Every structure is written in structure tokens, then in C-alpha cells.
């Protein structure tokens, strides 16, 4: 059975802190991995990672995939209150757009 | 480009009724996936449609069904509603082979 585990489940930090969110997966026919940010409504796309060891960066957010360890991390530096959200990772399986979401990490950034 | 749209945004139904939710993908996207999100279970995959054909299906009972039209718009139907079907239903669209999916705002269904 496919398994996606995110840790920690919940995290409370103060503005300016750096956080690292983890995603590990055990799935069949892994193709790539997506990260999403979900605030009040729909998840918004952050990154897609296909190759191991290549960091993707967008402003204060960065992410990297480790196919050997079957895991990915999402880093957020100099956190702001606007980063408060649930962060979801989702491996894509097979040739179709078959995604399996983790339970998410709820990040709260306090002023 | 307009984003993914879903209608209705909110819905209240009673047990035993049926409901139909609609999703219009981003123009040019031919793949539409449906998800159920609840506080206890997180985001769970329902099914995916591509070119009017169901390509993938998650572990949901047969009361959950869907279809896709030739213009890529998709509908999801839940029959014989149960209290546990109360959830946010999200649809997402993507381009063939691209992978990343773009979500609509969701339909919040409450079953009383």
C-alpha cells in the first residue's frame, strides 16, 4: 500500500525562524513529487521535483528530493506570518496524474 | 488564464439525498482529478478523468461517481449521502504529462 508521511504534523515558530518540513514516501511507480501550500481554501502549487539532489528555489522557499532515501524536504527561511498554512507533499505515481497526498504539516508563524 | 472553477461553493444536503458537483478546468487542461478533504483523513484521491475516460480511481465506495464531458468539464456525483460525506471536495486540472495540478476553490458539502 502506498504511504506518504509528513513530519512534523504541526509546528509553531516565530517570525524570522527557519523551518524544515519533511516528506517521506513508499509508493509504487514514483515519477515526481509535488509540494503545495494550503491556507484557507485550495492548495496552491509550490514545487515539482523529479530529479534527485537538484534544489528548487522560490524566494525564501526551497525544496530538494532524495530518491535514495525516498524523501523530500521543504525549507522556509526568515519565516513570516503569511507562511502560516498547511504544507502538503504528494508523490505522483505512474504515467497518469495519480497523486497521493500526505497528511500535511500545519505551520504557524507567530509575530 | 482563468483558474479552475467549481460550483456550487457551498451545499447543504440531508442524508439519503444525492448531489452533483461541477468542475471546469483551466483552458487547455484535459485531466481533471477529484479529491475529498476532511480534517481526520486529509486529502484523499477520488478519481481522475482524461479525455472523458476515468483513468484512476481511489478507494471510495460506488456511491461516488464522476464523468467528464468533451469540453473537459467534469462532474462528480454522490448518491445516498451519509453524514461522513461532509467534506471539502476539490478538483484539480493539469496538462497532459506535466504533472503539477492546479486546484479549484472547492465545494464544501455539509450533510445533515
Image: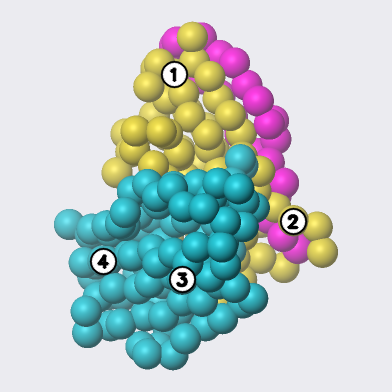
**Label located before the other in sequence (2 or 1):** 2
In space, the residues marked 2 and 1 are separated at their CA atoms by: 29 Å
Which of A69/B24 is in front?
Answer: A69
| Residue under pointer 2 | B3
For disc 1, the chain is: B
Query: What residue is shown with label 4?
Result: A25
Disc 4 with disc 3 on a shared chain: yes
Is residue A98 visible from the viewing direction of this image? no
Circle nearer the N terminus (4, 3): 4
Kindly tell me whether residue A18 is visible in this rendering: yes
| 2 or 3: mark nearer the eye | 3
Q: Are marks 2 and 3 on the same chain?
A: no
Q: Quadrant of residue A23?
A: bottom left
Examine the structure image and report whether residue A87 is included in the region drawn in magenta.
no
The Cα–Cα distance between marks 2 and 3, rounded to whole angstroms, is: 27 Å
Q: Quadrant of the N terminus of chain B?
A: bottom right
Find residue B8 and report its horizontal and vertical position in percent: 69, 30
SS category of the residue bearing label 4: strand
Residue corresponding to mark 1? B81
Q: Which residue is mark 3?
A: A75
Mark 1, other Cα within 10 Å: few <14 / some 14–19 / many ≥20: many
Rendered shade, chain B: yellow
Instruction: Mark 3: give few (<14), some (14-19) or many (20+) Cα within 10 Å.
Output: some
Q: Nearer the viewer, residue A27 or A16?
A: A16
Provide the residue span drawn in magenta. Answer: B5-27
Amino acid at each position: 500500500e502506498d504511504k506518504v508521511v509528513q513530519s512534523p504534523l504541526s509546528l509553531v515558530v516565530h517570525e524570522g525562524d527557519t523551518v524544515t518540513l519533511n516528506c517521506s514516501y513508499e509508493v509504487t511507480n514514483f515519477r515526481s513529487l509535488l509540494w503545495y501550500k494550503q491556507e484557507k481554501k485550495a492548495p496552491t502549487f509550490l514545487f515539482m521535483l523529479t530529479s534527485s539532489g537538484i534544489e528548487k528555489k522560490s524566494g525564501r522557499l526551497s525544496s530538494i528530493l532524495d530518491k535514495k532515501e525516498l524523501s523530500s524536504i521543504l525549507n522556509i527561511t526568515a519565516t513570516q506570518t503569511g507562511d502560516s498554512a498547511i504544507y502538503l507533499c504528494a508523490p505522483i505515481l505512474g504515467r497518469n496524474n495519480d497523486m497521493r497526498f500526505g497528511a500535511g504539516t500545519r505551520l504557524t508563524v507567530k509575530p | 488564464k482563468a483558474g479552475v472553477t467549481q460550483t456550487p461553493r457551498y451545499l447543504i444536503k440531508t442524508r439519503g439525498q444525492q448531489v452533483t458537483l461541477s468542475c471546469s478546468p483551466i483552458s487547455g487542461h484535459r485531466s481533471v482529478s477529484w479529491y475529498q478533504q476532511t480534517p481526520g483523513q486529509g486529502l484523499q484521491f477520488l478519481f481522475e478523468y482524461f479525455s472523458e475516460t476515468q483513468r484512476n480511481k481511489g478507494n471510495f465506495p460506488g456511491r461516488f461517481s464522476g464523468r467528464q464531458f468533451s469540453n473537459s468539464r467534469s462532474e462528480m456525483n454522490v448518491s445516498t449521502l451519509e453524514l461522513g460525506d461532509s467534506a471539502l471536495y476539490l478538483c484539480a486540472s493539469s496538462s497532459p504529462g506535466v504533472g503539477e495540478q492546479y486546484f479549484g476553490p472547492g465545494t464544501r458539502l455539509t450533510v445533515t
